Amino acid sequence: MRVELTVNGRARADEVEDRLLLIHYLREVCGLRAANVGCDTTSCGACTVLLDGQSVKSCTVLTAQAAGREVTTAEALASDAGLHPVQAAFQQEHGLQCGFCTPGMVMAAVGLLAENPHPTEAEVREGLEGNLCRCTGYHNIVRAVLTAAAAGPGGPASRGAGHDEHEVSA
Amino acid sequence: MIPAPFDYIAAQSADHALGLLATHGDDAKLLAGGHSLLPMMKLRLATPAVLIDIGGLGELAGISADGGDLVIGAATRHAELAASELVRADAPLLSHAAAQVGDPQIRHRGTIGGSLAHADPAADLPMALVALGGSVELRGPGGTRRVSADDFFAGFFETALEPAELLTAVRVPRQPGAGWGYEKFTRRANDWAIVGVAAVGGRIALANMGPRPLRATAAEQALAGGASPAEAAQHAAEGTAPGEDMHADRAYRQHLARVLTRRALERQLAG
């Protein structure tokens, strides 16, 4: 089937199998490898991306279900001006260890802060309950999200930290 | 894990979906949020040849008041249900239950109609609908019928839905200001209930205490007869024969039902 959708600000049209899951579409058709396949059972959140601005687990969404909609992956977060505030806060607070859960964790945090810009610590912990960190690095992850929230859209630190290779989100 | 091949069809309307159901019969499955069906398809526990997507149908979404009832479109997502001011005011137990389903990502996709039609006996929304004395509207080739929650859940993952029918809406009585209690016992943050209890308006519903969401009728009767929450809760597991798994054996589930019912009833009394 033919699907038309927007991925990281860019309109796309692709011929895909009806059964193609969004995570495989993003990784294999679009070449966007930030979102990971972790548990593959809607549990771990490593495949989290935004669908029309809301966090979803892309291992449990058909590409067909994203037709006509906007998908955002971690690749779209940084800009020429530097890291996205949530990425900068994860860097500042060392909100990652092995890094496997990080793209999903960051996207879940971006979705959470869009819905609730000033969450309490308890709200952050509940808001990230769909994302597992098997290094158990939760304290720094929660701290990073709170840091990003406190800093607001400007970010917690200077935004000149490189990452120029990434596309700018439209 | 990849589902077996199927043909995907985005329904253009509820009637279109009904027509497709009639055409494809048992080969077809309805897809809304897909958060029960797609995991089953990935495990090849379900292998429909045709998927009829009703998740994008505006006519099946939205929440409104209709006299004494709240009417909730079947394709309303859990996150919308949990965030609705109307639901929070008139059926706060339902609002709370919707916020207990899975995790934020799951609540952004899963729908109330899908959860009810899936009829997992451990799930939040089937138990909530039974506690609230709600009903569902089922549209088929011959028109629409309304079925109470007590009659809708027929067995283990089994409902009163006929193969050619579509669950279009959910109704719950508006009970502003009514006390309610909701207890969900889990070991992991985003899990199904090992046992769940929902209490409101003299009704008590149990999750994962049998093949379908059950009423704790003996406890309800004790409560109606003037028993205290603690006394009534002693009857909560009467007549149940819950399954056993790695989380709990039968006796432990029955113990949980009594403890959680007491907590739910005390919370309900506290308003």
Image (spheres, helix red, strand yellow):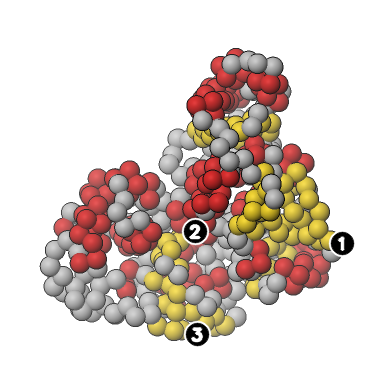
Res. B166 image quadrant: bottom right
Residue A70: x percent and y percent?
45, 74
Q: Position of residue B200 (x, y in %)?
A: 61, 33
State the residue position of label 1: B142
Q: Quote the CA–CA distance across marks 3 and 2.
A: 25 Å
Residue B76 % position (x, y) = 59, 58
Name the residue type under label 2: His
Residue drawn at 60 percent across, 57 percent down? B63
Let me know if residue A18 appears in the view: yes
Residue drawn at 52 percent across, 53 percent down: B84
Q: How crowded is mark 3: few (under 14 residues within 10 Å), some or many (20 or more)?
A: few
Q: Quadrant of residue B91?
A: top right
Q: Which amino acid does label 1 sit on?
A: Gly
| CB contact under 8 Å: marks 3 and 2 | no
Vertical arrangement, residue B74 with respect to residue A71, above or below? above
> CA gap, disc 1 to disc 2?
33 Å
- Mark 1 belongs to chain: B
Identify the residue position indicated by label 2 in the image.
Answer: B108
Image spot of residue A109 (x, y percent): 33, 58
